[in-house]
């Protein structure tokens, strides 16, 4: 079995202190590829440095909506420069977060639009963070993302109706351990709708460990096998067949070898 964690934060916290051990555990579990994702200039640089160190590890660079208020012309120039690195495979995560509103909403929209323009210029996929901001996210994608070839709504926690909108736009949807949570019936209804060629898996570690490991506060790529097993059962598929299908979708999305 081969799986790719398409969205992890290996430059964060305790994971960053033992990346070698995290990678070894991941490989032993069958998760043999990783896209480590930046959220601000410092973590973008760290993500690229990690991708340089490990085979089958790649980076995405972006500014999280929480940090949109700090985005300057220099921030965007460095982001574009990093995005040209041979192991950078996407822009993100970027988007809108109207749950916490750590940055003013207009600043979030401005930073999001700017990153969509960079992705279009460089012909890179985009990793979307959207929390309590679905309609605004879709509106901005329609306005600024018309030339984008690949977009994924990461850590999908929306409704089946929202999933249908995303799929109708030609985009991908990625699921974390949230889909295994007891109170996630709506997310499971959404997952049931997503065809295998548009479905990806991620941990979003160090956050959101899946059941039955939810009490493990620090998530890691090795635990993604629990999400894979859960979704394979939901799709009434053999685990290996399911893993092969979503891995093929992930490789195609990020243009991985």
Image (spheres, rainbow, N blue to C red):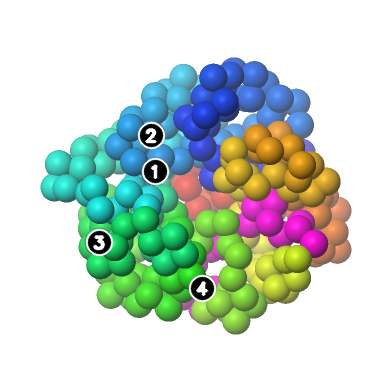
Q: Upstream in the sequence, badge 3 or badge 1?
A: 1
Q: Is residue 179 magenta?
A: yes
**Measured Cα–Cα span from mark 4 to mark 2:** 28 Å
Q: Is residue 246 above or below residue 148?
A: above
Image coords of residue 194 (percent x, y): 65, 69
Q: Residue at x 47, y 47 (%)?
A: 254
Q: Is residue 7 above or below residue 68?
A: above
Mark 3 and mark 4 in contact? Answer it, CB < 8 Å: no
Q: Secondary structure at mark 4?
A: helix
The residue to which callout 1 is attached is: 39
Region rendered in magenta: 167-182
Image coords of residue 233 (percent x, y): 85, 59
Q: Upstream in the sequence, badge 1 or badge 4?
A: 1
The residue to which callout 2 is attached is: 43
Q: Residue at x 36, y 36 (%)?
A: 44
The residue to which callout 3 is attached is: 107
Image coords of residue 191 (percent x, y): 69, 67
Q: Nearer the viewer, residue 169 or 68?
A: 68
Q: Upstream in the sequence, badge 3 or badge 2?
A: 2
Mark 4 and mark 2 in contact? Answer it, CB < 8 Å: no
Q: Nearer the viewer, residue 68 or 188?
A: 68
**Measured Cα–Cα span from mark 3 to mark 2:** 20 Å
Mark 1 and mark 2 in contact? Answer it, CB < 8 Å: yes
Q: Secondary structure at mark 1?
A: loop
């Amino acid at each position: 079995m081969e799986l790719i964690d398409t969205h992890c934060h290996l430059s964060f916290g305790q994971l960053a202190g033992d990346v070698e051990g995290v990678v070894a555990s991941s490989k032993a579990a069958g998760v043999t590829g990783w896209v480590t994702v930046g959220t601000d200039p410092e973590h973008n640089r760290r993500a690229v440095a990690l991708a340089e160190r490990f085979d089958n590890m790649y980076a995405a660079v972006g500014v999280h909506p929480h940090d949109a208020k700090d985005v300057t012309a220099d921030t965007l120039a460095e982001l574009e420069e990093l995005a040209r690195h041979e192991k950078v495979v996407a822009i993100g995560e970027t988007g809108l977060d109207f749950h916490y509103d750590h940055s003013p909403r207009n600043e979030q929209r401005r930073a999001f639009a700017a990153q969509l323009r960079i992705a279009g210029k460089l012909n890179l996929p985009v990793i979307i963070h959207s929390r309590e901001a679905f309609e605004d996210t879709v509106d901005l994608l329609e306005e600024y993302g018309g030339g984008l070839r690949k977009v994924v709504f990461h850590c999908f926690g929306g409704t089946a109706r929202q999933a249908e909108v995303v799929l109708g736009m030609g985009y991908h949807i990625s699921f974390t351990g949230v889909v295994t949570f007891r109170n996630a019936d709506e997310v499971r209804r959404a997952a049931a709708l997503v065809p295998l060629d548009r479905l990806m898996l991620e941990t979003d570690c160090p956050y959101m460990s899946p059941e039955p490991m939810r009490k493990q506060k620090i998530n890691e790529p090795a635990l993604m096998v629990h999400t894979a097993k859960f979704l394979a059962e939901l799709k009434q598929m053999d685990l290996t067949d399911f893993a092969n299908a979503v891995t093929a979708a992930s490789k195609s999305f990020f243009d991985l070898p």
